[in-house]
């Protein structure tokens, strides 16, 4: 079996299966061998359901044998037989849902998250649940960065990002309240996409902040991001904020379209490390040589307080959704989580009401910029993944776009001299998700030629 098989994108794997060049069982077994070899070092998984996955793969192969190639290519299950990982904050009835804390370890729920249902309906094989930080916010889990085991993979979707980067699965589901999709994607050197607020249902997902929580996805190919979005986007009355927006603009490539990007440092640019500033500068030069217009833009000073607003909303949500744990299981709450609870406890209802209006106000301020630019190019992390596992890195360069509910994507920018991945962030206008993906597909080959393709971990 080819060593590259576990690193196939879902798109390529589906095509090979449809053409009879690969079976679903072969693909799954390659992933399982990778897990067996690497999981003792990576610790990406909270729970694995291998026997059921193998049975599902065999069932798909049996069904595929009854169809011709054309029928398999046009089958109504876009993710048929593709292994996928799900962050352990999404409810599952056949696997425990622990929310990253010993308080709920081994707990089985009597319902499943909307995204889990949609994945199953699309034919995906849910291989297991991946490690998350404590309540998707606080203390880090044991997951390591596949590119250097002594560095963090980022959080809170640590296991999902690491599993995709290490070739354990081609796809994974995560969540973002501040920077929990984009940051791990950048640290692990893969694509991570956070869609516009309200596109994917959060029903059955552990809540942190009603105002900030987004479902997001990880993949090693941009086409795979599209595959997942086509499956997951849709209205759900069980999530009041999930309107679905089924008629999202779908931008088609137009050779006459002169792409214009705004380079935005954000008000916290001074926190970026030298290696990140240098790589972003190189990326801008590379894109400009490809006739992409990139203009530096300074945000209005009114936006400078965004980070405090994001933290307060997160703290308020944590306290009101989970603060009772402080009294009932305080000894099992980390010092970091207790600090979040105490901060949230001090936020009044009137202050929360003012905070919850920030999204519309900030979106109004940003709207004129999207009238002039197709997307924003901006840093996603301060630099490469920090040393050690306790510090999952800062989401400060993601917070503003999460607060505004804007679609955002990590584009890999190669690696540092020490082999740690770097990335940049593309941010789109509200509900211009398809346009943002088109821009990413236009920019990615240019950046790939300059800085290298998605890197496989050395081991």
Image (tube, grey):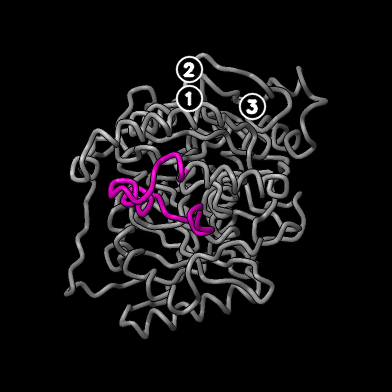
Question: Is 102 located above or below residue 80 in the figure?
Answer: above
Q: Is residue 252 left or right of residue 376?
A: left
For this orientation, the residue located farthest to the top is 110
Q: CA distance from mark 2 to mark 3?
A: 14 Å
Residue 359 percent location from the top left of the image? 43, 45
**How far apart are labels 2 and 1 at the CA level?**
7 Å
373 up-or-down from 141: above or below: below
Farthest-out residue, bottom = 289
Residue that appears at 76% across and 17% down: 328
Q: Determine whether, in the image, residue 87 is placed left or right of residue 408.
A: right
Of mark 1 and mark 3, the one earlier in the sequence is: 3
Q: How busy is the neighbourhood of tag 3: few (under 14 within 10 Å), some, or many (20 plus)?
A: many
Label 1 sits on residue: 204
Q: Which residues are magenta?
A: 1-27
Residue indicated by mark 2: 111
Q: Residue at x 56, y 31 (%)?
A: 50
Mark 1 vs mark 3: give the one in front. Answer: 3
- Crowding around mark 2 (Cα neighbors within 10 Å: few <14, some 14 to 19, many 20+) is few
Residue at 42%, 32% (x, y): give it. Answer: 58
Circle 2/circle 1 CB separation < 8 Å: yes
Location of residue 164 in the rendering, given as x and y in whole percent from the top left corner: 53, 50
Mark 3 secondary-structure assignment: loop
**Residue 60, percent from left and from top:** 36, 33
Measure how far apart labels 1 and 3 are at the Cα level: 13 Å
Q: Position of residue 387 (x, y in %)?
A: 75, 60
To which residue does mark 3 refer? Answer: 98
Q: Please, what secondary structure does the residue beneath circle 1 have?
A: loop
Can residue 303 be seen here? The reply is: no
| Between 185 and 46, the one nearer to me in the picture | 46
């Amino acid at each position: 079996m080819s060593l590259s098989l576990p690193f196939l994108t879902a798109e390529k794997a589906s095509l090979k299966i449809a053409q009879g060049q690969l079976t679903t069982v072969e693909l799954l077994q390659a992933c399982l061998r990778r897990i067996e070899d690497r999981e003792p070092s990576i610790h990406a998984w909270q729970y694995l359901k291998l026997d059921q996955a193998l049975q599902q793969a065999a069932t798909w192969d049996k069904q595929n044998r009854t169809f011709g190639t054309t029928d398999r290519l046009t089958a109504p299950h876009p993710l048929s037989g593709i292994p996928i990982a799900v962050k352990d904050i999404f409810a599952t009835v056949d696997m425990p849902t622990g929310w990253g804390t010993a308080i709920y370890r081994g707990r089985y729920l009597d319902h499943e998250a909307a995204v889990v249902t949609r994945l199953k309906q699309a034919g995906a094989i849910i291989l297991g649940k991946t490690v998350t930080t404590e309540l998707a916010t606080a203390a880090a889990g044991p997951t390591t960065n596949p590119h250097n085991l002594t560095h963090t993979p980022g959080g809170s979707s640590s296991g999902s990002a690491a599993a995709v980067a290490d070739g354990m699965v081609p796809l994974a589901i995560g969540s973002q309240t501040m920077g929990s999709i984009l940051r791990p994607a950048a640290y692990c050197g893969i694509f991570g996409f956070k869609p516009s607020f309200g596109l994917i249902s959060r029903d059955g997902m552990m809540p942190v902040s009603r105002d900030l929580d987004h479902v997001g996805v990880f993949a090693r190919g941009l086409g795979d991001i599209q595959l997942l979005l086509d499956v997951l986007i849709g209205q759900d009355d069980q999530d009041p904020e999930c309107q679905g927006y089924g008629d999202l603009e779908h931008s088609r490539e137009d050779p006459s379209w002169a792409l214009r990007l705004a380079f935005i440092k954000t008000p916290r640019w001074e926190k970026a490390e030298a290696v990140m500033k240098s790589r972003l500068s190189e990326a801008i030069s590379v894109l400009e040589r490809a006739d992409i217009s990139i203009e530096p833009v300074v945000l209005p000073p009114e936006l400078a307080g965004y980070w405090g607003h994001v933290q307060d909303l997160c703290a308020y949500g944590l306290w009101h959704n989970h603060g009772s744990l402080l009294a009932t299981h305080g000894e099992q709450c980390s010092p970091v989580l207790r600090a979040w609870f105490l901060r949230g406890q001090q936020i009044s209802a009137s202050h929360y009401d003012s905070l919850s209006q920030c999204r519309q106000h900030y979106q109004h301020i940003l709207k004129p910029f999207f009238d002039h630019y197709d997307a924003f190019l901006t840093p996603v992390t301060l630099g490469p993944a920090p040393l050690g596992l306790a510090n999952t890195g800062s989401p400060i360069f993601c917070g503003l776009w999460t607060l505004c509910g804007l679609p955002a994507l990590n584009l890999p920018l190669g690696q540092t001299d020490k082999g740690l991945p770097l990335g940049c962030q593309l941010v789109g206008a509200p509900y211009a998700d398809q346009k943002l993906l088109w821009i990413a597909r236009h920019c990615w080959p240019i950046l790939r030629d300059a800085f290298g393709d998605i890197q496989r971990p050395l081991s």
